[in-house]
Amino acid sequence: MTGRRQTSRFAGIRSFCGAIRLVLCLVAVLVPMNAFAVNPDEVLPDPALEARARTISAELRCMVCQNQSIDDSNADLARDLRLLVRKRLTDGDTDQQVLDYIVSRYGEFVLLKPRLSEKTYILWGAPIALLVTGGLALAVYARRRAGKPTGSSLNADEEAQLKDILGK
């Protein structure tokens, strides 16, 4: 009997270790390696300028992929925008000037994080409004539910039958 307990205990540990191995294998296969789309010929010789260029590129949306930054995209347009960012930085533009220049050419959609302005108040305020509305609706529902009796009340005959059944 003790042999069974040890076997079942070890079987549980073995299955747990197997599950851990499976998860680790899935993570290794499914998580892509950090392969950035920036080619070596695009990298600036000045590390400070390159860091600024990478920061700006991470804020700009690839207009072809639309779900990636130009820093992560392999599209030709993303490459052109990365080169444009680097050119503007080497010409002496500030980060904000580079962003303003690209936004003036491609519109606000090119920004992965839209700016807070009159045009985007709804975009920024809608999630907060939805959370507040949902919270209020939940509170009203809970309050109404708490006020209602949970069970049906018994009449005198039913109470007598219940007492007989329970032996009181």
Image: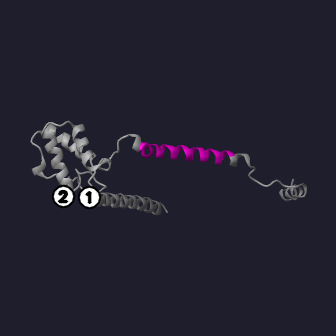
Counting from the top left corner in percent of width and height, residue 122 is at 45, 45
Q: Is residue 122 magenta?
A: yes
Ranked by sequence position, the earlier of labels 1 and 2 is 1
Say above or below: 72 vs 22: above
- Viewed as shown, does residue 162 lie left or right of 66? right
Counting from the top left corner in percent of width and height, residue 74 is at 20, 57
Q: What element carries label 2?
A: helix
Say above or below: 60 vs 23: above
Q: Is mark 1 on a helix, strand or loop?
A: loop
Name which quarter of the figure residue 7 lies in: bottom left
Say above or below: 19 vs 113: below
Who's the residue at 9% across and 51% down the image? 41
- Colour mapping used in the image: one colour
Q: Which amino acid does label 1 sit on?
A: Val
Counting from the top left corner in percent of width and height, residue 125 is at 46, 43
Q: What residue type is labelled 2?
A: Asp
Please provide the residue range marked out in magenta: 120-143
Which residue position holds label 1? Answer: 64
Name which quarter of the figure residue 92 lies in: top left
Give residue 40's mark.
none
Who's the residue at 11% across and 51% down the image? 40
Q: Does the magenta stretch include residue 58?
A: no
Give residue 76's mark.
2
Q: Can residue 28 be seen in this view?
A: yes
